[in-house]
Image: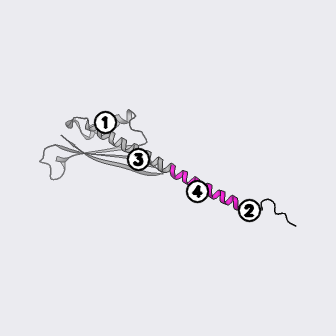
Amino acid sequence: MRSEKGFSAIDVVIALIVIVGFISIIAGGFYNYFVSSTGTARSSAALAYTIDVIESVEQMNYDDITSDSVKAKVDELYKSGRISKAYEVETQLIQYNKTMGNEKKQDLIKTLTVTVRYELSNRTQWIQIKRLITK
């Protein structure tokens, strides 16, 4: 006669399958949490860098704001460590009176576009803010 004590091989295999399934679900949850929190942190940093560039340019005298001076300001922020090398900052400055149909108007408005790019999960993410700068 067979003894009914202990676990059979089938009981052990089923228990292992259930345990592996639960561990997989928990590991997937941790991975998703990590990716989500990393994405939020990177996005927040990119936004902070974008605002930092805009605020630095706004502190300049209006007549001194040129494409070259804005690029120099960004280089200064990189060198001072206020912008991480993991982020790529691109700026574009357009004078309103140099746009089509507005050539005869005074130089009173400039449009500053700041784009910050960064890598997240092997994809390029970016944040872009446009700001009007007035005389």
In primary-sequence order, the first of circles 3 and 1 is 3
Mark 2 packing: few (<14 Cα in 10 Å), some, or many (20+)?
Answer: few
**54 lies left or right of 83:** left
Q: Which mark is residue 11?
A: 2
Mark 2–mark 4 distance (CA, rounded to whole Å): 21 Å
114 part of magenta stretch: no
- Determine the residue located farthest toward the top in the rendered image: 80
Q: Is residue 16 left or right of residue 78?
A: right
Q: Which mark is residue 25?
A: 4
The answer for how far apart the CA atoms under marks 2 and 3 are is 48 Å
Determine the residue positioned at 69% across, 58% down: 16
> What's under tag 2, amino acid-wise?
Asp
- The question of residue 11 being in magenta is answered with yes
Residue sitting farthest toward the front:
4
Circle 3 Cα neighbour tier, 10 Å, few/some/many (<14 / 14–19 / ≥20): some
Q: Which residues are magenta?
A: 10-33
Indicate the quadrant where residue 106 lies.
top left
Q: Which mark is residue 23?
A: none
Residue type indicated by callout 4: Ile
Q: Earlier in the sequence, mark 2 or mark 1?
A: 2
Question: Which of label 2 and label 1 is nearer to you?
Answer: 2
CB atoms of marks 3 and 1 within 8 Å: no
Give the x, y percent position of residue 68: 27, 38
Label 1 belongs to which residue?
73
Q: Between residue 126 and residue 39, name the one nearer to us.
A: 39
Image location (x, y in percent) of residue 42: 43, 45
